[in-house]
């Protein structure tokens, strides 16, 4: 899970696997996914309980739904 | 298995230490903070790592190696908050979530591109992306976000 200067750099890197090209996105799109409540709520004092609550589970499901899938 | 209320306190204590210092506590330090004996502290750390969060100990030890969004061992993702570089992110994606732990503060991620070695940086404050250099920056993973828990220390 790395950042690259451009799509061309990512495609040239040793870690690039064309089967996972759907996981190549502008950094702003990843920043949006990592803005989900499951990341924002980490500072709360009951985070593990919250993560296991219906609200936390729904947040996890919603975050996963935003992650791109293979075409 | 440790009671979830204790896991809540342990998660909060580890994260607060990392926000404050950039370093994770040893389980003996965590035990003192939680008011338990060292062996219980060791067990709590391991139960916390097994609780489903993307965190792990260094293989074969009880040392906290990675605790989201931070890494206790330096990575290429250097985090600077209001001019102080004290933290490292777990990965390029978690680097983008560090800002939620520093509300109202400018959080900058600096890292070398793994292809060319040239530096890239992104600066944020809360919901705002202040700058992206170069603007063509992308994120990429060849595994699912979070990935297989057993392989995390080796990726």
Image (cartoon, rainbow, N blue to C red):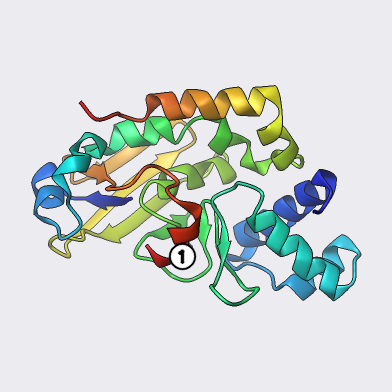
Inspect this view and state whether residue B131 appears: yes
Q: Say which quarter of the image contains residue B17.
A: bottom right
Q: Residue at x 58, y 45 (%)?
A: B101
Q: Secondary structure at mark 1?
A: helix
Coordinates of residue B48 in the picture (x, y in percent): 69, 55
Tally the marks.
Answer: 1
Coordinates of residue A7 in the picture (x, y in percent): 13, 43
How packed is label 1: few (under 14 Cα within 10 Å), some, or many (20 or more)? few
- Quarter of the C terminus of chain B within the rendering: bottom left
Q: Residue at x 66, y 42 (%)?
A: A43
Coordinates of residue B18 in the picture (x, y in percent): 62, 61
Nearer to the camera, B146 or B10: B146
Coordinates of residue B39 in the picture (x, y in percent): 83, 73
Is residue B112 shown above or below B95? below
Inspect this view and state whether residue B84 appears: no
Is residue A13 shown above or below B128? below
Q: Say which quarter of the image contains residue A31.
A: top left
Along the horizontal axis of the image, is A34 left or right of B56? left
Nearer to the camera, B71 or A60: A60
Along the horizontal axis of the image, is B79 left or right of B27? left
| Residue underneath mark 1 | B153
Along the horizontal axis of the image, is B92 left or right of B56? left
Chain that bears disc 1: B
Q: Residue at x 44, y 29 (%)?
A: A64
Along the horizontal axis of the image, is B108 left or right of A5? right
Q: Residue at x 65, y 73 (%)?
A: B62
């Amino acid at each position: 899970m790395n950042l690259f200067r451009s799509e061309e750099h990512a495609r040239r890197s040793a870690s690039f696997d064309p089967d996972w090209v759907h996981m190549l996105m502008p950094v702003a799109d990843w920043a949006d996914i990592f803005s989900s409540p499951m990341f924002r709520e980490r500072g709360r004092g009951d985070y593990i309980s919250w993560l296991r609550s219906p609200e936390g589970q729904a947040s996890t499901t919603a975050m996963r739904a935003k992650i791109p899938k293979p075409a | 298995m440790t009671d979830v209320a204790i896991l809540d306190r342990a998660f909060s204590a580890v994260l607060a230490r990392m926000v404050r210092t950039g370093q994770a506590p040893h389980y003996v330090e965590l035990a003192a903070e939680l008011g338990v004996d060292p062996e219980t502290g060791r067990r709590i750390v391991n139960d916390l790592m097994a609780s489903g969060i993307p965190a792990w100990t260094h293989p074969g030890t009880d040392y906290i190696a990675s605790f989201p969004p931070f890494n206790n061992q330096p990575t290429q993702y250097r985090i600077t908050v209001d001019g102080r570089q004290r933290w490292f992110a777990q990965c390029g994606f978690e680097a983008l979530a560090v800002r939620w732990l520093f509300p109202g503060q400018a959080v900058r991620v600096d890292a070398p591109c793994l292809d060319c070695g040239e530096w890239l940086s992104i600066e944020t404050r809360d919901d705002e992306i202040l700058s992206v250099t170069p603007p063509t920056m992308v994120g990429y993973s060849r595994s699912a976000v979070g990935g297989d828990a057993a392989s995390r220390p080796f990726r």
